Image (spheres, grey):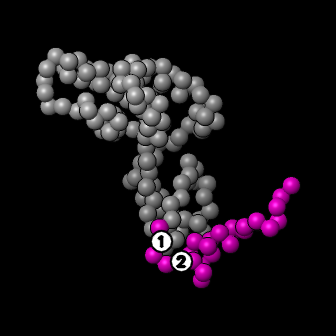
Amino acid sequence: RRNQCNYLSFSGFLNALDGVHAGEERIVFMTTNYVDQLDQALIRPGRIDLMQYFGDATPLQIRQMFFRFYPEHMSDEQNVTELQLENKIEAFIATLNGQGISMAELQEYFLLHKGDINTALGDAEMFVSQLLNSPRRQRRQTPTAVDNETLNQSMQAMATS
């Protein structure tokens, strides 16, 4: 049963974003996995000032997030233990790289293992396998290869049409 008291039309939504009663000095974040399906009125220049593509985690981002969760293991020392740990970190990064792991998924993994660095490093293959076979991933369409340059070109094309 639809609650008619809370119904919001598309026009009402656009007015809430930038209409007469919209507030000043505010930032609105909108996210979507399907930018090509958005109505042109919603994403026109002036209403949406910046579109940013967030791709999969890069090796550098994986490393940086790793040390955010385990800062006590960031060291310039080159003793045997630290070199062994560095090798494990590199293997961990190599396991995740190219698997389409998002930063949010990586953060979730580190939060689950924040108390045990060895489990975090050792369970990388299981993490990738479970993630790629999870119902959450099965529902997700195969993403199209989009980068910031392609996104910006699309926005410029829409602005001129």
26 in the magenta segment? yes
The residue that appears at 13% across and 27% down in the rendered structure is 77
User: Which span of residues is magenta-colored?
Assistant: 1-27
138 left or right, relative to 62: right
**Horizontal and vertical percent for residue 58?**
35, 37
| Residue 151 appears in the picture as rendered | yes
10 in the magenta segment? yes
Residue occupying the far bottom of the picture: 20
Badge 1 density bin: few <14, some 14–19, many ≥20, Cα 10 Å: few
State the CA–CA distance, disc 2 to disc 1. 7 Å
Q: Which label number is shown at residue 65?
A: none
Q: Which label number is shown at residue 23?
A: 2
The amino acid at mark 2 is Gly
The residue that appears at 62% across and 62% down in the rendered structure is 39
Q: Quadrant of the N terminus?
A: bottom right
The residue that appears at 54% across and 23% down in the rendered structure is 130
**Horizontal and vertical percent for residue 3?**
82, 61
Q: Secondary structure at mark 1?
A: loop
The residue that appears at 35% across and 25% down in the rendered structure is 117
The answer to which image quadrant residue 35 occupies is bottom right
* Residue labelled with disc 1: 26
Q: Secondary structure at mark 2?
A: loop
| Residue 56 appears in the picture as rendered | no
Badge 2 density bin: few <14, some 14–19, many ≥20, Cα 10 Å: few
